[in-house]
Image (spheres, grey):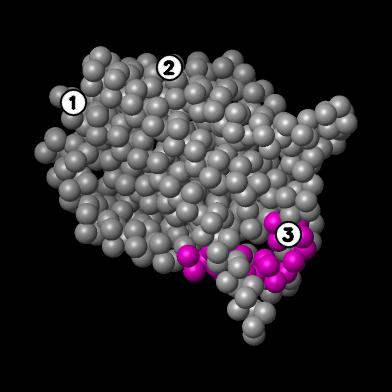
Amino acid sequence: KLEYIVMRSITTNKIWALAWPMILSNISVPLLGLVDTAVLGHLASANYLAAVAVGSAIIAFLYWGFGFLRMGTTGETAKAFGRHCGNESVLILLRAAAIALVISAIIAVFHPWLFRFGLWAMNSEANVSALADQYLNIRLYSAPAAMVNYVLIGWFIGMQRPKLALLSVIFCNVVNIALDLVFVVGLEMTSAGVAWATVIAEYASCLFGAWLAKPHIGAAINRATLRQLRQWQAWFALIKGNSFLFVRTVTLLLTMAAFTRRGGEFGTLVLAANALLMQLAMLVSYGLDGFANAAEALVGEAIGRKDNQQLRHAMMGTADFSAVVALLFTAFLWLGHEPMINALTTQTGIRAIATEYVSYVIAFPCIAVWCFWLDGVFIGANRHLPMMWSMLFSAVVVFGGLLIVLSDWQNHGLWTAYLTFMAARGLSLGFISYRYSKRESWFQSS
């Protein structure tokens, strides 16, 4: 019992040390979205806010479709960290960064067709689509920096250097927010100003992140290490292992795009109000992801060391923290949603609609917390295939089915379907996690 208590205490301290920088860095991401929303929400027309909502959904599909660059890098790096293989972790970083640049080149080649399809899929009004198209063509320039930033953040988490991830993300968002105010408020560039601010901030963050990583990789960069980059089997294994994450992430983004599209069918005011409420939900999501990130690092380390006791402590500790923080977020939203909505927009129509549906966002933390936590566990364990199947089931069967069944409920049906989708992800991954733990199969080949 004494050994158990000591081990649990050590794990708790490590969880908090890893989680708090990631919570701050993660929350700063949706705070940027809230600033975008607030800046545009105070303009005379709702079209600018709606256009950024549509454009952001499309660019998120393109960029976050390759979110495996972050998640896959974290899991592989965490295992290498657990095995004390410094050179291997550097090779993971270099391979992932190279793949990121190739992906950004592919996006650049195919972007006209991708943007055209995305705008068609969003089915927004003509004036909103024109502004969204302008936003997208500006954001395209940030693709290389955005992809490499995913890799750097994933590598920092896997190496258990969360403060470096915190510095990188906060630097990006501070630059972005400052440029938002300059371009939109000062120069009156509206939605185009928001896009240019993000592009410049992405490149500044990429350079800053590379500078932060340099002291940790400099000694490992030598001829012997670089020769290992020619081992094509490692490249193929990295690509194959991340293909499941790619399908999983694309499915998630298609679900979010379907959410935005269905909201657009109810009018521009509902689309803008849903965008505002989704920013609040994303604030919660990124905050809860701090403990998911801790689970990624600690579970990956335990898998690398093949330490079953450390794995159990990592899973139990991150689950406890996640549940407590979810309750705190729910209380925060319940008490503070009205002033937050009023701060984000001065338009009475958007305020009224957002207030009508805010109860769904208040319930969001306690429903969604389990899928976020379990995502962290499965990423750390490199169990990407069950993550893919869980997402496909939850998106196609649950979310898609409820959109049809609850179509008469309009926006209430849309939010009900979305919350049930989040619950289904947590329940399905929880069942798989229980089976793995019961059979003690976490350490078997994934």
**Going from the N terminus, do you reach mark 2 or mark 3 first?**
2
Q: Is residue 331 above or below residue 214?
A: below
Q: Is residue 74 above or below residue 321?
A: above
Looking at the image, the residue that sits furthest to the bottom is 1
Q: Is residue 396 visible?
A: yes
Q: Secondary structure at mark 3?
A: helix
Marks 2/1: CA distance? 21 Å
Q: Is residue 57 above or below residue 297?
A: above
Q: Secondary structure at mark 1?
A: loop
Relative depth, front residue between 300 and 235: 300
Q: Position of residue 162 (x, y in %)?
A: 55, 47
Q: Amino acid at mark 1?
A: Leu
Disc 2 target residue: 138
375 horizontally vs 196: left or right:
right
Mark 3 nearby-residue class (10 Å; few <14, some 14–19, many ≥20): many
Q: Main secondary structure of the magenta part?
A: helix
Disc 1 target residue: 43
Q: Is residue 422 above or below residue 204?
A: below
Looking at the image, the residue that sits furthest to the left is 348
233 horizontally vs 210: left or right:
right
Q: Is residue 375 visible?
A: no
**Going from the N terminus, do you reach mark 2 or mark 1 first?**
1
Q: Secondary structure at mark 2?
A: helix
Marks 3/1: CA distance? 51 Å
Residue 314 painted magenta: yes
| Magenta-highlighted residues | 301-321
11 horizontally vs 398: left or right:
right
Q: Position of residue 281 (x, y in %)?
A: 35, 49
Disc 3 target residue: 303
Residue 421 painted magenta: no
